[in-house]
Image (cartoon, rainbow, N blue to C red):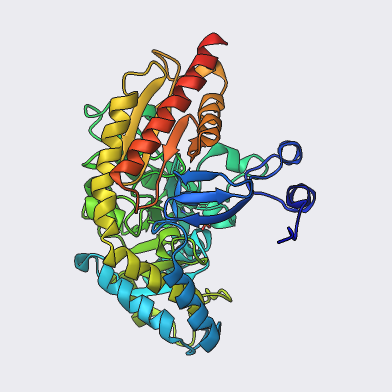
């Protein structure tokens, strides 16, 4: 068969813009074109098989090549590909998905109401609207600020991007002034210069200090990830969420949990909140809800917030938060098929058990390495934080060089891992087996050794 695009790499260089990519570097290097995938493995255009050790962007939970999702999508498209859900229009897959998720969230959290978006950023934008609306109908319209945490990542559109508190995302425009931040529970790089456990989890108290500083009557919600994701894959200390929950309740500031990465089994539970029995007011999700087969995100709302908005909104004032693709029926059909797979194959449990094995293997292979400062994980999420020996400076003195070198060496050996600041980060699909983990850790160990040799010699 003749190749329809013999010069695909050149066309990419010429026309396609890639996120998080330096244009001049991309023009020189060109793309890595992928043509297929099955389970945890991807096929490249030049015929290689590589392990997807990061599930794309933490999202391909059920792995690649799932025909039943493709079939569900095709069937829905043949019936009714799309219709808006504005006003009272509705579709069967959106209703079925809302009902299914209402059953999936922990019953005590009473998260029975939801709206679907196209991804995580617009889910968070929508949640901020709900938080402000809630405060307004409660008679506190001055509560408009959103408090997030340093190292937090909540997307890159304007409001969710302002809640993201990672400096490089704000190089050309400062975050919106309605967004403020507090310390994160990132013990290895404590924003407050303290040490756990003698700190008494002061980072949670810092949230209360920021609420006091800004004025309680100005803060609508606190948004947090159950496990810091893009900030470096950092699970919090065990006591953190109980403290945070109490602070939010004391000030009637809504607790908004961003489960975009941690939802749908990634941490070994259906939702990250289940590890610490968190009772959020609003939850956002995306990524694993469809395993990336189609774009979908969403906001789940607690009964308390729902009833306040339902009963106290002024007559004739609807919720003015509509996106064209809210509750998209075909994307919801993909999510339903994805949930079927997660449930039928016990993938949440596999993430818990095989994820624990992954962390144990990483500890065994890397804990004593001179360039390893910290090693963390939960479920199918893990990070090896690299540092100069006896310091917290980047290996080789230049930020992000060493993890990038490890990632490159791993790619050459057939494994995708992510260089995340000073971390080498892993988030394999939830279908990964112990044998897959052994292979991943073996490739990573060789890649780490190769990069270490180069950096030690430099
Ligand atoms: C925790 C978290 N929230 C929100 C987002 C934004 O999601 P999206 O890229 O789908 O807009 C991300 C993306 O990585 C994320 O990790």
Which residue is pictured at 29% across the width and 73% down the height?
102
As drawn, the residue found furthest toward the top would be: 457
Left or right: where 236 falls relative to 447: left
Whether 12 is drawn above or below 235: the answer is below
Which residue is pictured at 26% across the width and 52% down the height?
350
On the question of residue 191 being in view, the answer is no
On the question of residue 364 being in view, the answer is yes
As drawn, the residue found furthest toward the front would be: 1
Q: Quadrant of the N terminus?
A: bottom right
Residue 166 location (% of width, % of height): 52, 40
Give the camera-side residue of 260 and 440: 440
Residue 312 location (% of width, % of height): 37, 79
Give the camera-side residue of 284 and 119: 119
Whether 20 is drawn above or below 221: the answer is above
Q: Quadrant of the C terminus?
A: top right
Which residue is pictured at 34% across the width and 82% down the height?
311
């Amino acid at each position: 068969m003749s190749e329809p695009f013999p010069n695909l790499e050149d066309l990419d260089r010429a026309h396609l813009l890639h996120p998080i990519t330096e244009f001049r570097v991309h023009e020189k290097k060109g793309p890595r074109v992928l043509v297929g995938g099955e389970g945890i493995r991807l096929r490249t255009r030049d015929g290689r098989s590589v392990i997807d050790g990061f599930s794309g962007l933490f999202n391909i939970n059920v792995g690649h090549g799932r025909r039943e999702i493709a079939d569900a999508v095709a069937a829905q498209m043949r019936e009714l590909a799309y219709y808006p859900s504005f006003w009272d229009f509705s579709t069967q897959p959106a209703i079925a998905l809302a009902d299914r998720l209402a059953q999936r969230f922990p019953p005590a959290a009473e998260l029975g109401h939801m709206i679907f978006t196209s991804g995580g950023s617009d889910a968070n934008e929508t949640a901020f609207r709900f938080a402000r609306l809630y405060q307004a109908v409660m008679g506190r319209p001055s509560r408009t600020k959103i408090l997030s945490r340093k190292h937090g990542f909540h997307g890159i559109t304007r409001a969710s991007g302002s809640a993201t508190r990672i400096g490089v995302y704000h190089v050309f425009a400062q975050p919106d002034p309605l967004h403020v931040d507090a310390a994160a529970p990132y013990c290895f790089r404590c924003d407050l210069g303290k040490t756990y456990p003698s700190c008494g989890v002061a980072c949670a108290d810092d949230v209360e200090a920021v609420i006091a500083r800004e004025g309680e009557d100005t803060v609508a919600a606190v948004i947090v990830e159950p496990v810091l994701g893009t900030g470096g894959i950092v699970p919090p200390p065990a006591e953190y969420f109980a403290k945070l929950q109490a602070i939010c309740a004391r000030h009637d500031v809504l607790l908004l949990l961003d489960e975009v990465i941690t939802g749908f089994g990634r941490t070994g539970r259906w939702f990250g909140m289940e590890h610490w029995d968190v009772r959020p007011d609003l939850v956002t999700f995306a990524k694993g809800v469809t395993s990336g087969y189609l774009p979908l995100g969403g906001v789940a709302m607690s009964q308390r917030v729902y009833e306040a908005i339902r009963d106290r909104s002024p007559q004739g004032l609807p919720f003015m938060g509509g996106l064209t693709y809210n509750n998209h029926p075909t994307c919801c059909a993909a999510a339903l098929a994805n949930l079927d797979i997660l449930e039928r194959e016990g993938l949440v449990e596999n993430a818990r058990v095989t994820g624990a094995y992954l962390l144990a293997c990483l500890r065994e292979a890397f804990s004593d390495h001179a360039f390893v400062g910290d090693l963390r994980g939960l479920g199918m999420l893990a990070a090896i934080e690299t540092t100069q020996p006896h310091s917290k400076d980047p290996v080789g003195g230049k930020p992000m060089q060493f993890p990038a070198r490890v990632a490159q060496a791993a790619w050459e050996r057939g494994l995708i891992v992510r260089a995340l600041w000073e971390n080498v980060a892993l988030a394999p699909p939830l279908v990964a087996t112990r044998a897959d983990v052994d292979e991943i850790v073996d490739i990573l160990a060789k890649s780490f050794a190769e990069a270490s040799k180069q950096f030690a010699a430099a």
